[in-house]
Amino acid sequence: MTTTTLAVLVPLLPFLGAAAGLLLGRTAPGFVRPLAVVPILAALVLAVLVAADQGGGQALDATTELTPTGSVPIELSVHIDGFAALVAVLVGVVATCVQVYSTGYLRDDPRYPSYAALVSLFTSAMLLVVYSGDLIVLLVGWEIMGICSYFLVGHYWETPEARAASIKAFLVTKLGDVPFLIGLFALATETGSFRITTVLGAVAHGGLDHPTVIALLLLAGVAGKSAQFPLHTWLPDAMAGPTPVSALIHAATMVAAGVYFVARLLPVFEASRAAMVVLAVMAAVTMLGSGLAALAQDDIKRVLAYSTIGQLGYMTGALAVGERGAAVFHLLTHGAFKALLFLAAGVVIHAAGTNSLAAMSRMTNLRDRVPDAFWTMTVALLALAAIPPFSGFFSKESVLGAAEHVVTGHAEQIPEASGWITLVAGLVTALLTAAYATRLWLLAFHGRGAEAPDHGRQPLTMTVVLWVLAVPSLALGAFTFRLLPDWFDGHDLTPTLITSVVGTGLALAGVIVTYAAWRHTTALAARVPLGAVAAHPEGDAGLVEAEAIASHAPVYGGVAYAPDPADPGRLLLGPLHRHAAVGFHLDAVYATLFVRPVQAGASLVRFLDREVVETYVRGAGALPRLLGAAVRRAQTGNVQTYVSALLAGTVVLAVAVLLVATGA
Amino acid sequence: MHLAYPAVLAALLFCTGLYGVLARRNAILVLMSVELMLNAVNLNLVAFDVWLSRTTRETLHSGQALTLFTIAIAAAEIGIGLAIVLAVYRNRGTSDIDKLRDTAEGHETDGPDSDALTAEQAGRAGKTEATA
């Protein structure tokens, strides 16, 4: 088989698996698990083969046109360069881990067949986005991911949080997708093609007349999908979905798609200096805001969600300084350690029976109960905090190094401003990242108080994948930063000395400060008792999590917030804590700006329909009704009356005929 | 015989019948009045047939033939009518036309014949059953 055939099979196999899973889910439940895992695993193997074939050399292009589609042709094409090959491998690895994990996590779930099929479809769509060489085909995968995220986030639709979160995720990403679509059309109109290679060729020869408009339109879609400010609000709420879905969305699919898209079309963005500065500002605001918000969250998964937003900010920052190699490098390492963090968090939530850090900090021995999750999560948090030699350090330093490269004036195309913005925001965020990672680790695994409830042994499928993902989290950075430039643009990704020292120093400072704050506040923990904890020794992890999500708001007064004086984040943030916990009131702003006007418009339309349109309809009906009521009076039921009327009518007619006949 | 005599007699018979149909309360008497009207028409048919056959030498006597038809149909009609009256009397205990007002608008039956219930009334009845 040629490499092209293999590449086509990579997105196709999970798609077929999803179709078969949806069709056979009810009739043949025994096939559901194999159908979930095997196609994804096969796709992973094929993606590895494609990557080995491609080898980082010349990009592989293959195109076929099914039918002429009008002015600008739409073609089925694959475009596989080093970026596509490696990202596809990452997607395959994470999706396989998630599917294996889900067989344990949702083992008693009645909706597991449709869940597994949707995860396969999700993965297939992401692989389509990764391999596609045509922007419209890419858009198809892009939108399939949108609808899959809607279904998967709303998996526990019995809880109102999940229903609201799924609709929010769908609508917010759609808000970005509409300008995105317009941007794609504008791009195709100016360059005359939807093919990425042709588009990039036209851009290289200065074929774009309105690069800023196009870049900003495309950025809206990217901000929606990749959860960048100001369209990031769906991501923390999407934590109402099952943990494996969070891992999939955050590590490999969906949010990675936006960054990957910009990396593919980076020359389009580079054509506009304004767009690059906007990208940098967006990245900086996202990084700083999410770092502060993560420090104030009480739900362990929401901490991770905000950390995802922040790490995506790093990737966007790398793109803003024109270094897509660093962005995709961070995408790869982040995919590994963030998937690990989420899957481990799922194990922790199962073992603790709660998703609240405040409740976990009042439990002893959580660490000993789930040793696999503890050790792997420690590795992943170290990678997240960018402590050498874990993988996150190398990728994050490559981003900061690229920003420094721009600041020192080594790149002419890139505005120096975006370099400065990215560098400063990136360094401050390194501090914040280390702080919230430390806080999470201390609160989750170093609690004091009552014993955690027993939820039985963790299934083997759930613990094995943690160790599988721990390997790249630990070693992906150190072993590959010399090799990756061959796959990417050839830019050096080695950490530079100054940013490494400063960045690591800031990260260590964050760790130390948080530890000191925790030592200070942990004495207060005893004053506030343990919150609600779900206890189902026989239930599966999904059931425990659904109950934990549903009970968090009633117990603590909010999905993100807990009145816990022992929280070191509260001490560190001070008066900011209240605002950071609710994501700096951005949801309230959206509610005022968009939700209320729409609701007011809806009630206006309702009023017009009920009171104005209905009145005309009722008025039109009133006259016939009145006439009918008058005529009905004649129906007395007395036959003789009827006959009398008949006679009278006959007489009148006869007289009339006579008069006419006689000509009177 | 001049045509006027049978014509006046027929008119008188018809008016008597008409009065009976409009004014009598007993259904049987109403039916008898209908017979009177029919016979007035029969008389007219025969009389005019004779008159016409005398003036135009018409020999077919279609008027008299039609009278035979009318008599036969009237016999059938009175049979069915009396049967209906009998059935109504057995059902209601009366053959008084003034009291047989089931087709009146807004008429409420409390008797056993439920097919007089309109759909609206059926719905109302169902509702009251549900609340009861």
Image (cartoon, coloured by chain):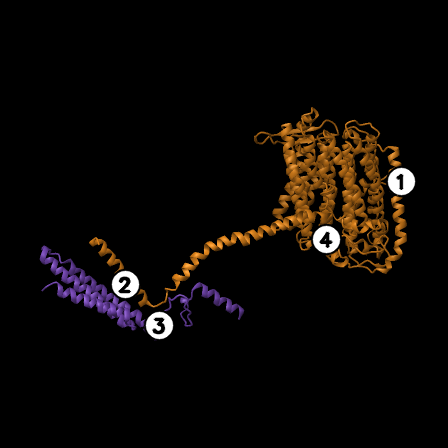
Q: Left or right: where does residue A28 sit relative to residue A236?
A: left
- Name the residue tied to disc 3: B99
- Name the residue tied to disc 1: A505
| Of A137 and A565, the residue lying toward us | A565
Q: Position of residue A148 (x, y in %)?
A: 66, 45
Q: Secondary structure at mark 2?
A: helix
Chain (purple): B
Residue found at x 25% / y 56%: A656
In the displayed structure, A398 sits above or below B24; it is: above
Q: Which of the two marks, 1 or 4, is nearer to us in this view?
A: 1
Residue at the farthest top position: A205
Marks 3 & 4, CB-CB < 8 Å contact: no
- Name the residue tied to disc 2: A647
Q: Position of residue A485 (x, y in %)?
A: 79, 30
Marks 1 & 3, CB-CB < 8 Å contact: no
Which amino acid does the dot numbered 1 rest on?
Answer: Gly
Residue A370 in sight from this viewpoint: yes
Marks 2 & 4, CB-CB < 8 Å contact: no
Marks 2 & 1, CB-CB < 8 Å contact: no
Which amino acid does the dot numbered 3 rest on?
Answer: Lys
